[in-house]
Image (tube, rainbow, N blue to C red):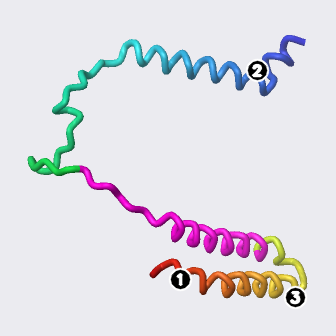
Amino acid sequence: MWIEIFTSLPFAFAVSIVVATLIYWYGGKIGAKGSKTSVKLSQYACGEYFMAEKLQVNVERFFIYAVYFLIFDILAFMLATSLLSPGLVPAMYALITLLAIILLMPFLRIKTR
């Protein structure tokens, strides 16, 4: 009975979490503590001080490329899993993917301007 408990997956997971927490806590206690001065926290670029600039990221364009990646990833998965199927099934998957890309093309052109 006890051997089954000690060799079970939840017990091993709990023990690994406890051990990792103890190692993290002990490392924090014995590790060197650095002082946080204003000079240490300031930005440094070859001795010149620059003001921080706000970075503008076009999130909509990122999502468009993420959708393209998702489409091609799904196509690759479908083609890889349908290799033993007759020739019509992979061709149909590729055609559906091509139609999805054609439908997204005008949206990409509008958003990149």
Examine the image and state in which quarter residue 37 appears: top left
Is residue 3 placed above or below 105 in the rendered structure?
above
Secondary structure of the residue carrying tag 3 is helix
Q: Position of residue 77 (x, y in %)?
A: 74, 70
Residue under pointer 1: 110
Q: Position of residue 101 (x, y in %)?
A: 67, 83
Secondary structure of the residue carrying tag 1 is helix
Residue name at image x 72 percent, y 23 percent: 12
Count of marks overlaid on the render: 3
Residue name at image x 69 percent, y 85 percent: 103
Q: Earlier in the sequence, mark 3 or mark 1?
A: 3
Is 62 included in the stretch rendered in magenta?
Answer: yes
Residue name at image x 56 percent, y 71 percent: 65
Comparing 50 with 17, the one in front is: 50
Q: Earlier in the sequence, mark 2 or mark 1?
A: 2
Is 86 included in the stretch rendered in magenta?
Answer: no
Label 2 Cα crowd, 10 Å radius (few <14 / some 14-19 / many 20+) = few
The CA distance from mark 2 to mark 1 is 55 Å
* Residue type for callout 3: Leu
Residue 88: image tag: 3
Is residue 76 placed above or below 46 in the rendered structure?
below
Q: Quadrant of the N terminus?
A: top right
Magenta stretch?
52-79
Viewer-nearest of discs 2 and 1? 1
Residue under pointer 2: 11
Comparing 82 with 52, the one in front is: 52
Q: Position of residue 27 (x, y in %)?
A: 43, 18
The CA distance from mark 3 to mark 2 is 50 Å
Helix, strand or loop: magenta stretch: helix
Q: Position of residue 36 (x, y in %)?
A: 24, 25
